């Protein structure tokens, strides 16, 4: 009898322990599942917010870079670049190109004469680049003693200015002219002279609609 009571008591204790363990395991599993779900929800929400913030900042940065490099707008002042550009016509400035390369002969550039920030932007065409010798003789432009352009494209130059005796361009110096050769204040004038690269804002790369003209690249 004593042995049977002991066995029953032992079996009862085992059953009680098993029930307790199942309850503990159930609670533990239930709690873990809840936290896992909550963690996943919070993690997904944080990921979604982080992705939104990242793309918002990225797009804002991209827009800023694009506007800084390609979207600066200015207006042409005067008739010096006719018939390529006209007075009052709005143009976009490409600042990006000259981060990696220097202006080339034939480029239409935007610059501040002598770096003067109190004046309007000047728009002219590059004729000579560093190392070139520019000479205007008998109304004809010579670069490095070679005939520069087809005289049928532009008027014969009436005043060669400081280039009549020849100018040798130093490092980072550019010689610029307006396309309207006889009605342009440019590198021929002593108060403008050669243009240093540090004064060049960028390349005039696109003109906006003006009169009958449409949006297009500047050549």
Image (spheres, grey):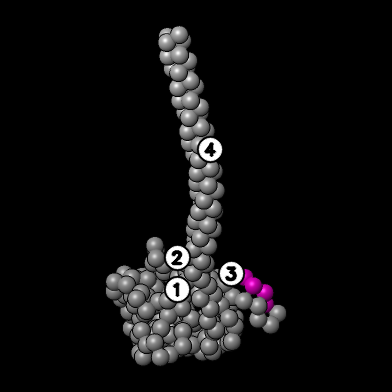
Q: Which disc is residue 30 wearing?
A: 4
Image quarter hosting the C terminus: bottom right
Q: Nearer the viewer, residue 201 or 186?
A: 201
Element class at badge 2: helix
Q: Which residue is mark 2?
A: 97
Above or below residue 36? Residue 82 is below
Q: Which comes sooner in the sequence, label 2 or label 1?
A: 2
- Nearer the camera: disc 2 or disc 3: 2
Image quarter hosting the N terminus: top left
Question: Residues under labels 1 and 3: Cα distance?
Answer: 14 Å
Q: Which comes sooner in the sequence, label 4 or label 3?
A: 4
- Nearer the camera: disc 4 or disc 3: 4
Check if mark 2's residue and mark 4's residue have beta carbons within 8 Å: no
Q: Which residue is mark 3?
A: 217
What are the residue bounds of the magenta stretch? 213-217
* Residue located 46% across and 88% down the image: 120
Q: Quadrant of residue 208?
A: bottom right
Q: Which comes sooner in the sequence, label 2 or label 3?
A: 2
- Nearer the camera: disc 1 or disc 4: 4
* Residue located 53% across and 38% down the image: 30
Q: Which comes sooner in the sequence, label 2 or label 4?
A: 4
Classed neighbour count for the residue bearing mark 1: other residues with Cα under 10 Å, few (<14), some (14–19), many (≥20): many
């Amino acid at each position: 009898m004593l042995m049977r009571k002991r066995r029953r008591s032992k079996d009862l204790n085992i059953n009680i322990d098993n029930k307790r363990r199942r309850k503990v395991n159930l609670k533990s599993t239930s709690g873990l599942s809840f936290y896992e779900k909550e963690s996943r929800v919070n993690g997904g929400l944080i990921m979604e917010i982080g992705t939104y913030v990242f793309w918002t900042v990225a797009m804002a940065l991209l827009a800023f870079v694009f506007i800084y490099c390609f979207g600066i707008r200015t207006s042409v002042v005067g008739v010096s670049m006719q018939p390529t550009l006209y007075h009052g016509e709005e143009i976009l400035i490409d600042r990006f190109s000259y981060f990696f390369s220097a202006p080339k002969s034939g480029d239409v550039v935007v610059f501040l004469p002598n770096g003067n920030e109190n004046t309007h932007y000047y728009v002219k065409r590059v004729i000579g680049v560093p190392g070139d010798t520019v000479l205007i003789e008998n109304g004809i432009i010579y670069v490095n003693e070679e005939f520069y352009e087809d005289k049928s494209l532009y008027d014969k130059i009436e005043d060669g200015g400081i280039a009549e005796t020849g100018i040798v361009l130093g490092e980072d110096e550019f010689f610029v002219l307006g396309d309207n050769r006889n009605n342009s204040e440019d590198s021929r004038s002593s108060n403008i002279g050669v243009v240093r690269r540090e004064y060049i804002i960028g390349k005039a790369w696109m003109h906006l609609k003006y009169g009958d003209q449409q949006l297009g690249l500047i050549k």
